[in-house]
Amino acid sequence: MSLDTPIAQPDPMRPVPGLSRLAQDLLPALYQHRLVATSQLHRLFTPHARRPVYLRQQLAKLRADGLVDATTRRTSRLGRAELLWYITARGADAVAQDPTIPRRGYRISPQTAASQLQEHTLTVVDTGVAFVDWAHRLGHECSPLDWEPEVAHRIRDGEARGADDAFMIPDAVLRYTHTTEGGRRRMLSFFIEVDRATMQTTRLAAKLAAYARYQHYVPNGGRRSRSVREAWRDRYPAFPRLLIVLTGASERVLANRVQDLRALAAADPHVSQLTAGVTTLQLLQDQGPFAPVMTPLSGDTTPTDVFLAPTGGTRD
């Protein structure tokens, strides 16, 4: 087995009296991902059911028990609405009893659930759902808990100009187990950065620079010690690949966005050293992460898969 990063497989959450197994699985997913649409939960937990009738029943029971709540999202010009689910304080307390579930200090409120953050949060979930969907199709492993949103990575390298610059915060860290036809397993990790074509290029440049800084960042203690060790090695056996996922605009606009990102990378020698690629959410959903859907951020423009191996290179 090749290890890019270890994947902790958590034990099931401690049972809450009166809840089904599906309801028990839904709670930690809502706790971790903050806001999830009914259709997304259907693809994650009941993909083989034609209609999510049982899923809706279990969500309604969780809501009646005060463990989750929902807001609405308009999904068409005709006004068809979809429920978006989030965990309540009571539900979060129930999940927190399980020591295998990573603690999330962030709590979503009804106001936040209905705010402009809604679309960005749901797009990050859509990206994770695409990986889970294709893992099922390909016989790989990726579960609803195998990505974490907004994991902070501290950077104290003297370049920080403010509190925001002292951290590198991906939209998500995603873990995936790839299995070859010969049965060889490889555990991969990715930094996911979602761009809905609303971010200014200068902000994109700053985010890319933060990834490059983190890749080479050595804490002060490390500089004083005999061996120099980058901070990321305490979290990851290999530095995660950076996947930039574009959506929210026409194909032409997104194609221009890819060129802008490559130009930003070319202008910064540190950024150009990242193992990074750009794709669209549509390509990721339609063709999967192991089709040639990724345009490398630097170097050759030939599309490749999420391994992002250079032309003529190997994946391992």
Image (cartoon, grey):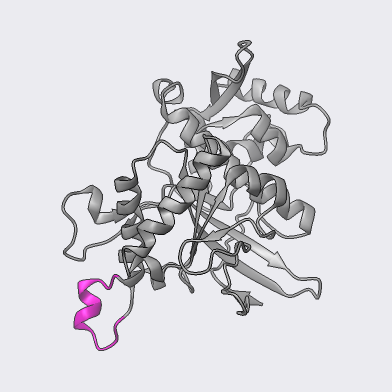
Choose between 85 and 135: the one closer to the eye. 135
Indicate whether residue 225 is drawn in magenta.
yes
Tell me if residue 252 comes above or below residue 208 in the rendering.
Answer: above
Look at 29% across and 47% down and name the residue there.
202
**x and y percentages locating residue 104 in the rendered image:** 42, 44
Choose between 84 and 79: the one closer to the eye. 79
What range is drawn magenta here? 217-228
**x and y percentages locating residue 306 in the rendered image:** 60, 62
**x and y percentages locating residue 206 in the rendered image:** 30, 52
Would you say residue 304 is visible in this rendering?
yes
- Quarter of the image that includes the C terminus: bottom right
Indicate whether residue 27 is drawn in magenta.
no
**x and y percentages locating residue 301 in the rendered image:** 54, 63
Choose between 155 and 90: the one closer to the eye. 155
186 relative to 237 in the view: left or right: right
Examine the image and state in which quarter residue 82 appears: top right
- Quarter of the image that includes the N terminus: bottom right
Task: Please identify the residue farthest to the top as the structure is shown.
Answer: 78
